[in-house]
Amino acid sequence: MKQRDIDNLRALMEFEAARTEPPKAFPALPDLPAGRYIDPRFYELEKEHIWRKAWLFAAHIDELPEPGCFQLWDHTGQPTVIVHAQDGSINAFYNTCQHRGAPVVLEQSGRRSSLTCKYHGWSYNFQGELISVRDLEDFRELDFTCRALKPVRCERFGNLIFLNYDEDAPSLLDWLGPVADEWREFQFDRCRLLSKEAFDLECNWKIAMEANTEVYHVPNIHPNTVAPFLDDRRNVNTFYPNGHGRMVAPQKMTYEERPDGGGRTGFPQIDTVSEIGQTCTQSYGVFPNWVSPLNQMTIPPLLFWPTSIRTTRFEVWTLCFEDDQGNVPGDVQNIWTSPDGSELSQVLLEDTQFGARIQKSMESDGFEGVPLSYQEARIYHWNQWADRLIGIENIPEELRVAQVLSDDWLMPNDPRLDEIGINVSAG
């Protein structure tokens, strides 16, 4: 992070601590319609547009370490196989044989020399090309070039593998935009997979995710776990194109000063991380469902996948910097769960404790909508971009959100800097 950006963030932290009302240029936020959490019509729109058009974090290269390795992936109703090809590329295909539609791969993961359907033996290479058909003499003029596995767009950011089901979507780097530039200091090409666990939650996926995109709840929900260490009144929210967001809040003490090391004792240090990443909680929301604090020791993504309109599959990942030999450190543990991975950490238990009750309350006649505060504006920003991706005209009027947060608030713009007399274009 450039020194100018660090100085601007520090100035904004003091602005946030001193203000007695929202910034002068900040708009009033209309209520989010209740149906965005409970109406089957909006849930179907999410499935049709958000999960098919956005870039989705699907896997880490450590899950497919060598050529021939494959992994099944199906979080969005589109069965997909991700493969590590012999040329070193990572490719993805619909897990659908082009003969009779059977799945090409049945096992969750493994290693093969080719992808061969067990139904009739059609075989494909790791570029998706049809290479062998049993009893070829029984087919008349079968054109192999027209029978390749249908590809799914697959791109990498460092060691992270992303999928997109939309052939017309922008590239992953264009999708991430300024976020990709800010992430370079964390050396994603040297982050290794330490752990990955999943838990089922009984609430809409956005209810679960939104608990991790604002600090308004910290004094109430985390009085003994987060509040003693996080200066929530100096939190700075930033909005990016494509619905991404960031929060930066200074820590009241460093991880080294905390009694338990913040759960990060023994992790290798990422020596390129700037002052902000070392002294603040710097958390990104990457549209649609990634939330992750990043610091000089860990990259721990939280992923929220809908399994129904009222249930969620909650994935918790811990990625760490490789040691001096390029290996996963052997003496560190994941930060999001108990040591055996059987239950969530105390902080995440606090974040998820009300999900089922909130879902039930939202489905009652007493719930009409969500009035968001300035501190919760990242939630509103997310919803505005969800409507843009879906297509505002495709959404019933009573389920839409007003587009009141203008592009003047998108990074690198920030009207708050104008309010405190800092020229963002200077330097």
Image (cartoon, helix red, strand yellow):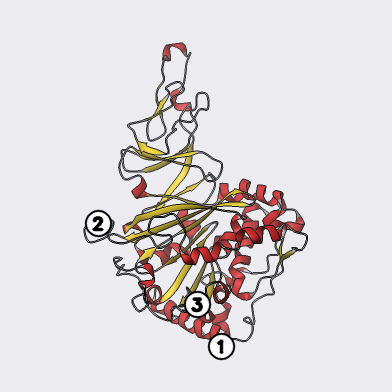
Q: Secondary structure at mark 2?
A: loop
Q: CA distance from mark 3 to mark 1?
A: 19 Å
* Label located before the other in sequence (3 or 1): 1
> Residue 70's spot in the image, x, y percent?
38, 39
User: Which amino acid does the dot numbered 1 rest on?
Assistant: Ala
Label 1 Cα neighbours within 10 Å, binned few <14 / some 14-19 / many ≥20: few
User: Which amino acid does the dot numbered 3 rest on?
Assistant: Ala
> Residue 261's spot in the image, x, y percent?
35, 72
Q: Which residue is mark 3?
A: 227
User: Which amino acid does the dot numbered 2 rest on?
Assistant: Gly
Label 2 Cα neighbours within 10 Å, binned few <14 / some 14-19 / many ≥20: few
Q: Quadrant of the C terminus?
A: bottom left
Instruction: Using residue 177 as the reference point, say whether residue 326 is left or right of it.
Output: left
Q: Which residue is mark 1?
A: 18
Is 80 drawn above or below residue 388 in the view shown? above
Q: CA distance from mark 1 to mark 2?
A: 45 Å
> Residue 50's spot in the image, x, y percent?
59, 51
Q: Nearer the viewer, residue 161 or 192?
A: 192
* Label located before the other in sequence (1 or 2): 1
Is 77 drawn above or below residue 224 in the view shown? above
* Label located before the other in sequence (2 or 3): 3
Q: Are marks 2 and 3 in contact (CB under 8 Å)?
A: no
Q: Quadrant of the N terminus?
A: bottom left
Q: Nearer the viewer, residue 261 or 409?
A: 261
Q: Nearer the viewer, residue 46 or 149?
A: 46
